Image (spheres, helix red, strand yellow):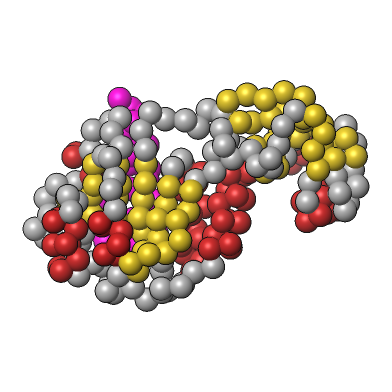
Amino acid sequence: MSWRAFFVSLHSIIKPMNVFYLPEAELGLVHLSEDESKHCVRVMRMQKDDVVCVTNGNGLLMDAVLFDANPKHCVLKINASKIGNDFWPFKLHIAIAPTKNIERIEWFLEKVTEIGIDEVCLFSSKHSERKIVRHDRLEKIVISAVKQSIKSRLPHIHPIISFEELVKQDFDGLKYIAWIDPTINDTLVNDYQAGQNVLILIGPEGDFSAGEVLLAKQFGFKPISLGSSRLRTETAGMVACQTIQLINQLK
């Protein structure tokens, strides 16, 4: 058997898990939206009695079967539920300035959702090139990433606020501001201790101004470096998220 034939055969045996997001899901019969129903039947070619997974975005994963494969209003029968494995004993928040090219911040949201994050706050600052976002579109990106990575919890995406409002908000945990400056010697990987709640500020393409860093310090934020490389905004956000998750997994 050729390698190509082997993988085609393997794919027919190991089918990818189909996941649906239903925040109101409970045991018994539930209905998919018209868009989800069309995707299920017309695009994914699913048929009656096919096995699926349902996430409610609030900590539960559910086993279900396709009860009625109607392209306008599919019905699923949920048979069992379990607690998801994407819980951790700390809170991970990242605040980030939206990029001029919105696709880059969408990429960031997709990746940190897959890695694991609790909340993302969007803010505008002095050097921001984008001060308006479509919050509904960003939520769709996050929901899609939750389904793709079979997560049980949906990260909370806060509407955009000003930098000044952001730094004045209360947060019970460590507070960092990632700043590109030669005077910054402390790195996130060395300063953060596993198990602690953490909020990390990631600046826009033009970075934070010196005045913004000073204001953040006045409200308890510590300037830190994410390493020796100069990173794009969305890359810096993903690196910060991955760093916190890895430190906690290796403790």
Say whether residue 128 is left or right of residue 24. Answer: left
What is the count of numbered marks? Answer: 0
Say whether residue 148 is left or right of residue 115. Answer: right
Q: Main secondary structure of the magenta part?
A: helix
Residue 141's quadrant in the figure?
A: bottom right
Q: Is residue 119 above or below residue 183?
A: above
Q: Residue at x 51, y 60 (%)?
A: 106
Residue 196 place in picture, x, y as percent: 28, 33
Residue 192 place in picture, x, y as percent: 23, 38
Say whether residue 239 is magenta: yes
Say whether residue 151 is left or right of residue 68. Answer: left
Q: Is residue 77 visible?
A: yes
Say whether residue 192 is left or right of residue 236. Answer: left
Q: Is residue 1 visible?
A: no
Q: Quadrant of the C terminus?
A: top left
Viewer-closest of 63 and 244: 63
Residue 10's quadrant in the figure?
A: top right
Viewer-closest of 47 and 75: 75
Say whether residue 11 is magenta: no
Q: Residue at x 87, y 53 (%)?
A: 72
Q: Residue at x 72, y 39 (%)?
A: 18
Residue 160 place in picture, x, y as percent: 42, 64
Q: Residue at x 28, y 74 (%)?
A: 127
Q: Quadrant of the N terminus?
A: top right
Residue 100 place in picture, x, y as percent: 42, 74
Q: Which residues are magenta?
A: 226-251
